[in-house]
Every structure is written in C-alpha cells, then in structure tokens.
Image (tube, helix red, strand yellow):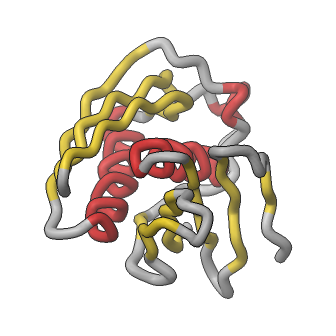
Amino acid sequence: MVAVTKSRSAFGWEHFPHVADIGVRGWGKTIDEAFEQAAIALTEVICDLAKVQPVQQVHIHCEAPDHEILLVDWLNSLIYEMATRRVLFSRFEVGITGCTLKAVAWGEVIDRKRHQPAVETKGATYTALRVAKDANGTWVAQCIVDV
C-alpha cells in the first residue's frame, strides 16, 4: 500500500501503510494543528470527508501524561463519539495546554447512502506512535488505527 498524501503544505494529513491496519498522520505549525489533521486523516479512513457536513458539535476533553498518549486518547475519544452518537466528524478545533486537550468536533449523523462508510475504526493504538517536531520545526502526530 502506498501512502496517500492530501497536502504537503504547512499543515496536512496522510495515511501510511501497515500490515493489517492503517496509519494516520497529521502535521502542522503547532501541535494543535497536527492533532486536528490526524483527526481528519481518521475520518478519511472511514469515508470521504467532503461528504460530511459540520452541523452538530461535540466537546471533547482529554488529559494524559504525555503528548503521545494524548494523541491516542484524542483519536479514541473521537472513535467513541462516532460509535455512540452514530456520527462522522469533518471539522476539528483543538487546543492543547501542557498535556490537556480541549476540542470541538463538528459533524453529522451517518447517512450510509451518502457517506458510504468503508470501514469501522476500532481504536487508535500505540503502534508507530509519535508526536514530535521534525527537523523543520513542523509538529507531526501519528499512530496506527485498528480497522
């Protein structure tokens, strides 16, 4: 499987290959942007983000001992909200202070005909987990998602 890259600008996201599952990676000028982009990559694992309207919002709060575990908690919180509310998200606003994340995710109830979900995400894992600045000062947030 070849990585699918949607953007190589100052921020963006991509999927990267893994034997049985799929990697999600987000990057940005700030850690907040990298987490937002990782969430977009998560939605794109499921369906075409462009088909999801941001009509309802969900507030999410996570705390963790470090940024890497915070990323897993963030993505797993989104997966939980999608499963229990039967929604898909298309827009994210993340604020991280220390190792505390406060975010708003916007989306809508799943319409199987319009959204055509391809897979069900089961959870973000610690495999290939990384949250750090690269040599150019860009924040990168990535992990493998179990599908």
Residue depicted at 41% across the width and 51% down the height: 31
Residue depicted at 52% across the width and 62% down the height: 140
**Looking at the image, can residue 64 be seen?**
yes
- Is 102 situated above or below 71? above
Please identify the quarter of the rendering in which residue 85 is found: top left
Residue depicted at 57% across the width and 54% down the height: 27
Depth check: give the residue in front, 36 or 126. Answer: 36
* Quadrant of the image containing the C terminus: bottom right
Q: Residue furthest front?
A: 136
- Is 30 situated above or below 89? below
Please identify the quarter of the rendering in which residue 114 is found: top right
Residue depicted at 52% across the width and 73% down the height: 144
Depth check: give the residue in front, 146 or 14. Answer: 14
In the image, residue 136 lies at what x, y percent? 61, 63
Q: Is residue 114 left or right of residue 30?
A: right
In the image, residue 137 lies at what x, y percent? 54, 60
Q: Residue furthest right?
A: 2
Q: Is residue 77 left or right of residue 17?
A: left
* Quadrant of the image containing the N terminus: bottom right
Q: Residue furthest top?
A: 55
In the image, residue 121 lies at what x, y percent? 51, 59
**Looking at the image, can residue 145 be seen?**
no
